[in-house]
Image: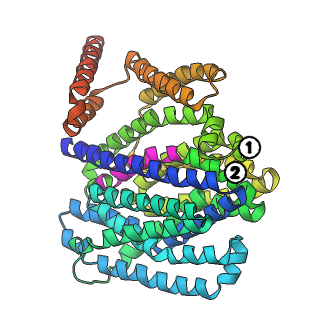
Amino acid sequence: MVEVRKNLMSNTSYLLIGWIGSIILNFLFQMIAAKTLLPDELGVLSTAISFAAILSSVLVFGMEQTTQKLASFYLGKNKIEYISSVLWFFFLLTIFLNVIVISGLLLFSTDVSQAIKIPRNILFISIFALLPLSVSFFLAGILRGYQNMRYLTTTAIFGDLLKVIVAGSLVVIGYKVYGFMIGYLIGVVSILLLRISNIRRFISKFKIPSTNIITKYAVPSFITQIFWLILLSGQYIIITILQNPYATGLFTVAMILSNQIYFVPRIISDALFPITSRLSANRMFFKQQCYLLNIALRYSFLFSLPILFFVSIFPIPLIFLIGQPLFFPAAELVPILVTASLFFGVATLLSRTLYAIGKTMTFQTISIVFTIFYIITSVILTISYSALGTAIAYLITTLLMTVVSLYYLKKYISFRIEYIPLVKIFMGSFITFSLLYLISFRTPSLIAGAVLTMLFTILYFLMLYFMKFYNDNDLKILDFISERVPFAAKYVVRLKNLLSEKIKRQSENNDQRNQ
């Protein structure tokens, strides 16, 4: 258990670094776009990037997650050579699918351009980004399966940095939308080149995998990947088709602010997934899986709620930071979308656990049912309420998806949520940030709001201290941080000693009550 917990912390730390780097660089990319493009132009850029993201994930055919699952699973069974022998097949299949689809898109580019309402030249850049995106996704699955999170993070940050530099340089020259798309293309190509240079470390001779692997793991992952992408990126295309690029631009700005919270539970999910897959090689480890999943949920909500309240309380200053006053109407979407994004992150964590324990058909069914539900509700509500309707449909869908995923985890591995820590998190956050909300009416400045949010976040963690929230797992995380961040070790050790005394007294009081 100690080794498993240490792997979880290590995976999470590298993925967290990657997430922070990605947030900063992508936020900078999107902020430059919002500052320099009109709403219609920003809508075109969002649609073009979403089009490439959705299609490239489809073209991976579920092999990214399948590779991640099987690599972890057979590492648990000590059969490393089995999974490495089929990676060439998946790799070549990804390239073959890309060649077929790219050829078709180039042949019918005029029709596709008219259907999604973007210029043909912009569409060409999206099409050329498909191959590097697809292969990069596939290689990311290999890196995650072998828990090589450090290299995964390094390549992603380098590609995002190059994207921002190239796009920013071209915009200064006057290329506008074309500049952003060229920067995007160069960024994804650089990630591909870095990851593919390492491929021989993970693959051996070519071998066609068994039909069972494809039908049980690849197909459900492929289908689910499509539907998840519709939930994450399909909104832009739906709004553009049913409304106009202006409404898409407003939704884009609101989603830029809101969607970052999704990555808190998603990072924890990515860190947990290979560990859960490896433990699933033996049914004796179901209790460990439940234990780790409760830890994942605990930290997902612990760190997400301050972000949720900050973004919800200060949407106007944040929109002004990343965009223009033209985008202020997007503020009404932010509280809905940030809540929906949190639930989608939690639903992703729970449903991917179903896949990791081998319940792939349940995983697939959940994604199909709720994506169809989302498409129907979003179309109806978008026609009536424009981008606001899309946001409401997103919230309803992600909330229901979370509840159903919890139900099936309880059914398959007898998973039970530890409610007491979650109740303390919600109580502490509600009390603390309600006070911040009352003060925010006198705080129009974003800088003042950020400072206040930091102070109230400290108050939030302090309140949890008096609510007896912290436990031994928090002490182990502090140990891990002190080892990895030497310059802060002295302060971390002091904090650990303070918490340790509190936890020790809690334990003694509990023992006395039990006697």
Who's the residue at 28% across and 65% down the image?
A: 71
Residue where numbered disc 1 is placed? 329
Label 1 neighbour load within 10 Å: few <14, some 14-19, many 20+ = some
Q: Is residue 34 visible?
A: yes
Label 2 neighbour load within 10 Å: few <14, some 14-19, many 20+ = many
In terms of depth relative to the viewer, which is nearer, 341 or 506?
A: 341
Who's the residue at 60% across and 67% down the image?
A: 175
Image coordinates of residue 308 in percent, x first then y, are 55, 36
Image coordinates of residue 160 in percent, x first then y, are 43, 59
Q: Residue 250 got which mark? A: 2
CB within 8 Å, label 1 to label 2: yes
Who's the residue at 62% across and 44% down the image?
A: 337
- Asked which secondary structure carries label 1, the reply is helix
In terms of depth relative to the viewer, which is nearer, 263 or 221?
A: 263
Magenta segment includes 268: yes
Give the residue type at disc 2: Leu
Image coordinates of residue 61 in percent, x first then y, are 46, 73
Query: Looking at the picture, does residue 305 appear above or below residue 361?
Result: above
Image coordinates of residue 97 in percent, x first then y, are 47, 82
Query: Looking at the picture, does residue 369 appear above or below residue 99?
Result: above
Q: Indicate the quadrant containing the N terminus: top left, top right, bottom left or bottom right.
A: top left
Q: Magenta segment, which residues?
A: 260-275
Q: Is residue 180 visible?
A: no
Q: Residue furthest right?
A: 384
Q: Is residue 501 left or right of residue 173?
A: left
Q: Residue 496 got which mark? A: none
Would you say the magenta stretch is mainly helix, strand or loop? helix
**Sequence order check, earlier mark of 1 and 2:** 2
Q: Indicate the quadrant containing the C terminus: top left, top right, bottom left or bottom right.
A: top left
Who's the residue at 40% across and 52% down the image?
A: 353
